[in-house]
Amino acid sequence: QGNQKYELGSSELTALMRDLATHKSSPFFSVKDEEPVRHALKVREALASNNYGSFFKLYSEAPNMGQYIMDYMTSKMRLAAMRVILKSYRPSIAVDFITKALAFDSSSECRDYLKAGNMVLTADESNVDTKSSSIDVGGIAEYEGSTGTLL
């Protein structure tokens, strides 16, 4: 026996949000076209589809103080993205690409993250050897804890 109130799936939630946006009597209707609301809906869509590219693009473009709210989600998205990147890009990928794609503030911050996650960098630290790398979730969690973000 579950709580019937919470047995709705994500498709029902999407339908509910669509209905709220289309019914003129809804309080959401009057603000649905404002930039922060449109941005929040796009972020929700990126999270639901695990689309790290869209998520970090939206993170970089967040209106008002939206980045502060999104900060709570960046660790999880970075970890998911690194899993995809390590499987998809062979034999290596540039650290500068990862820095930009995952919205790190600098290449050195990205390198610290990669090293904490036990990823193998080339001798000049400009690329990640994706064939030899694996993710140390504990190391990343420790790094994220020391930088003040949440995992």
Image: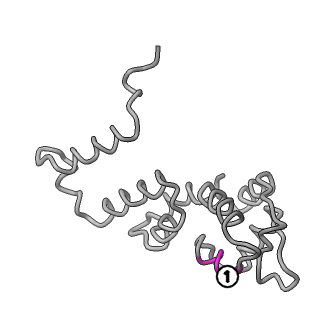
x then y, percent, for residue 127: 76, 80
The reply to whether the magenta stretch includes residue 73 is no
Question: For this rendering, which residue is in front, 32 or 128?
Answer: 128
Furthest residue in direction left, as rendered = 24
Magenta residues, dominant SS class: helix
| Residue 27, x across and y down, in percent | 19, 47
Q: Which residue extends farthest right? A: 123
Q: Residue pushed farthest top?
A: 1
On whether residue 97 falls in the magenta region, the answer is yes
User: In terms of depth relative to the viewer, which is nearer, 12 or 72?
Assistant: 12
Q: Amino acid at mark 1?
A: Asp
Question: What residue is drawn where x is 66% and y is 80%?
Answer: 106
Q: Which residue is mark 1?
A: 96
Classify residue 93 by image quadrant.
bottom right
Residue 132 lies, with reference to residue 9, above or below; the image says: below
Q: Position of residue 52 (x, y in %)?
A: 54, 63
Describe the element under mark 1 as helix, strand or loop. Answer: helix
At horizontal 79% and vertical 61% (from top left) the residue drawn is: 117
Horizontal relation, residue 4 to residue 59: left or right: left
- Count the labels in the image: 1
> Which of the 4 image quadrants contains residue 97?
bottom right
Pointer 1: residues within 10 angstroms few (<14), some, or many (20+)?
Answer: some
Name the quadrant containing residue 7: top left
Observer-nearest residue: 11 or 103? 11
Say if 150 sits above or below 120 in the image: above
Give the side of residue 133 with respect to residue 90, left or right.
right
- The magenta-colored residue range is 94-100
Q: Residue at x 66, y 52 (%)?
A: 151
Q: Residue at x 58, y 74 (%)?
A: 101
In the image, 79: left or right of 64?
Answer: right
